[in-house]
Amino acid sequence: MNCEHARRLANQVTWPASETAAAQDVAEIPADLEEHLWSCPACRTELTELRALRCRLRALGNRPAPDHLAPRIVSAIRLDHRRHASARRSALHLRRALAAAAAAAAIAAGGAYLVTHRASGTGADRAVSANVAPLVTEYADFRGAQPFGDRDAAAIVRARMKERKRP
Amino acid sequence: MSRPARILLIAVTLIVAAVVAQAASTGPELLRRSQQAERAHSYRGTRVSRMFFPRYSITAVAGVVHQRPATTRVEYRSPSSIEGTVVLQVGAQRWRRASGDRLWQRAAAPPEPEAFDLLLRNYDLRVSPGTQPVAQRDCSLLLIDPRHKGNPSKRMWIDRATGLVLRTELLNWKQQHISISAFRDIEVNPNLTGVLPSLAPPRQAQIAPRRTALGFQPIPPRYIPPGYVSRGTDPMTLGKFTAAHLRYTDGLNTISLFQAPGQAFADETPFGSMELSFTQVIMWRRGDMAFAIMGDIDPAELRKMADSIAPPAPPRARMSP
């Protein structure tokens, strides 16, 4: 399994099609994805971040979306339909569009936290998640300086990088 | 017994008692007592830890259960990024399981308790006069400061009744606070019957496989800062590659040196040096290998250590017959 396939599966696990699975948080991780996750910290981090995003969205509850959001979602979906004839791909992109829209709603609701912990980002962000964060966590673990995980470590390094860039 | 002899005996007894009391209150004795306390007492409580960074801090709340002599289970309730994560330590072995995961993962082994003598060689231990309350218990305050400049310090609040450590403060090499960890509440020697199954070490089938074949020979540094000794090399998974984790300790502080094939690191990796409040970081590439060194120590010392890691000499060209 390659990273692209793993991320597609991770999206499906995080945003399961079944409402029951979503509500009960019981979406199973397929064995091949689990195997890939053990050997790929980048995908593991992405899945963790997606899950955290879902938790935060749930915590927001049913807040009314801004008026301009619905037309934008609809146009995004229509654009996706035009571009992708395959029904399966459309469903996947619909989920992605909904996830993106949900993320936008969360940010609109004041989720500044998501800005610093975003799942996707620049190549440097991904490199920090995949290469630097696991080493920082391992060091902290050896030193007994827990508590934090890879995601916190990545956020700490990114925050430091941003500070260094400031004049 | 004559009166003068009785007076002499009482005086000698008083002097011996004073000497014993003084010895018991010295830093090394207090620290040794705290290490033995974990083996003598079980406990259960809530521990709040806070890590400090330049513009913010992370606070974690964890439920801690310790069964004497050497089993400790820590379950994090916050922050959300590690909520539900469990760290289980049995003797010198540690495992971690994130919330939602079915398999445990081996965690880096902590510095061994045998590092006590090493710590005494490298740090001054003093007891602050008086007592201070933590979790409604009277504690003695132990101050641990480095003999070699450029290393971190530690403060420990030790329960006078049991010797258990109830509060810890870590200061980095610049003497800035980097973390505070303290029990909010603690119950000593409680009935743990109900939680015993959660203290059992995971079976082999429940532990994620860890890569062991390095595929390369790690290069040790020629220079190690004063007081530090090697604690061995551990393999760790880094993407599709296995990295080597060379560990060094001075009894309190640690230095980690990571080495991995260069392909394990993306081109966008922020190579160079960085300060992360609780550690200095230097990352670089040389030849077909990538290196990272981390430690809460004067960056000049860390740089010296990094510079001493020279790649092996290229094989000599064969002489033509």
Image (cartoon, coloured by chain):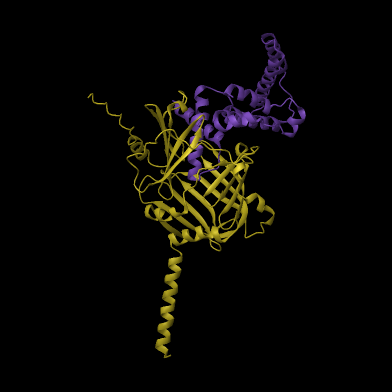
Chain colours: A purple, B yellow
Query: Where residue B80 sits: x, y (%)?
Result: 63, 37
Residue A132 vertical position relative to residue B117 in the rendered view, above or below: above
Q: Residue furthest top?
A: A82
Q: Quadrant of residue B28?
A: bottom left
Residue A129 seen:
yes
Q: Residue furthest front?
A: B321
Q: Quadrant of residue B42?
A: bottom right
Left or right of B255, for residue B65: right
Camera-side residue of B56 and B150: B150
User: Which residue is painted at 49% across and 47% down in the image?
Assistant: B110
Camera-side residue of B152 and B89: B89
Quarter containing the C terminus of chain A: top left
Residue B24 vertical position relative to residue A51 in the rendered view, above or below: below
Query: Where residue A112 sits: x, y (%)?
Result: 60, 29
User: Which residue is painted at 30% across and 31% down in the image?
Assistant: B313
Left or right of A136, for residue B282: left
Q: Residue furthest right?
A: A20
Quarter containing the N terminus of chain A: top right
Residue B17 vertical position relative to residue A60 in the rendered view, above or below: below
Q: How many marks?
A: 0
Query: Where residue A84 sits: x, y (%)?
Result: 67, 11
Q: Residue furthest left?
A: B321
Camera-side residue of A125 and A130: A130
Query: Where residue A29 sits: x, y (%)?
Result: 66, 31
Residue B132 seen:
no
Left or right of B151, for residue B70: right
